[in-house]
Amino acid sequence: MSLTAKVPHFHYVDEINCNALVELKTAFQKNNPYSDVKHTFLPILVKSLSMALTKYPSLNSCFKEDSMEVIFKGSHNIGVAMATPNGLVVPNIKNVQSLSILQKS
């Protein structure tokens, strides 16, 4: 845990207009050929995060203290924590930068 205290953390809060996001989700659902598939905001948000990591690659990096270098990661492996009746589960979606919003990993 002492090493964790050395890792820089940041917190960012902003307010945005999500009307276009709501319209996009509605369009996905309206044009959905599978009645049993429900589209949610999560895939759109995960893909948006991946696009932000492409634009700001330093957010997808780590610092190697022994060699004093920053290692930029090429893959966007994004985990989303979910509370379940059996406890916290964090599925990790691999290579999000190579997936479309509608693709599964």
Image (cartoon, grey):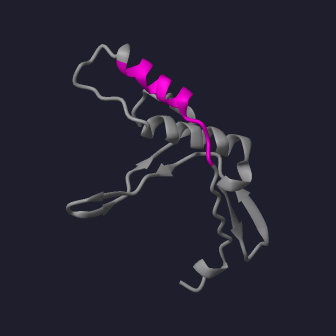
Front-most of 97 and 19?
19
Which image quarter is the C terminus in? Answer: top left
Q: Of helix, strand and loop, which mostly describes the magenta segment? A: helix
Q: Is residue 104 above or below residue 64?
A: above
Q: Residue 29 sits in which quadrant?
A: top left
Question: Residue 43 appears at what percent x and percent y?
Answer: 45, 36
Q: Residue furthest bottom?
A: 2
Give the magenta-colored segment's residue range: 15-29
Question: Residue 1 appears at what percent x and percent y?
Answer: 53, 83
- In the shown orientation, is residue 90 left or right of residue 44? left
Q: Residue at x 20, y 61 (%)?
A: 85
Q: Is residue 59 magenta?
A: no
Front-most of 99 and 101?
101
Q: Is residue 11 above or below residue 43?
A: below
Q: Residue at x 72, y 41 (%)?
A: 55
Q: Residue 93 sits in which quadrant?
A: top left
Q: Residue at x 50, y 49 (%)?
A: 78
Q: Is residue 14 above or below residue 6?
A: above
Q: Residue 90 sits in which quadrant?
A: bottom left
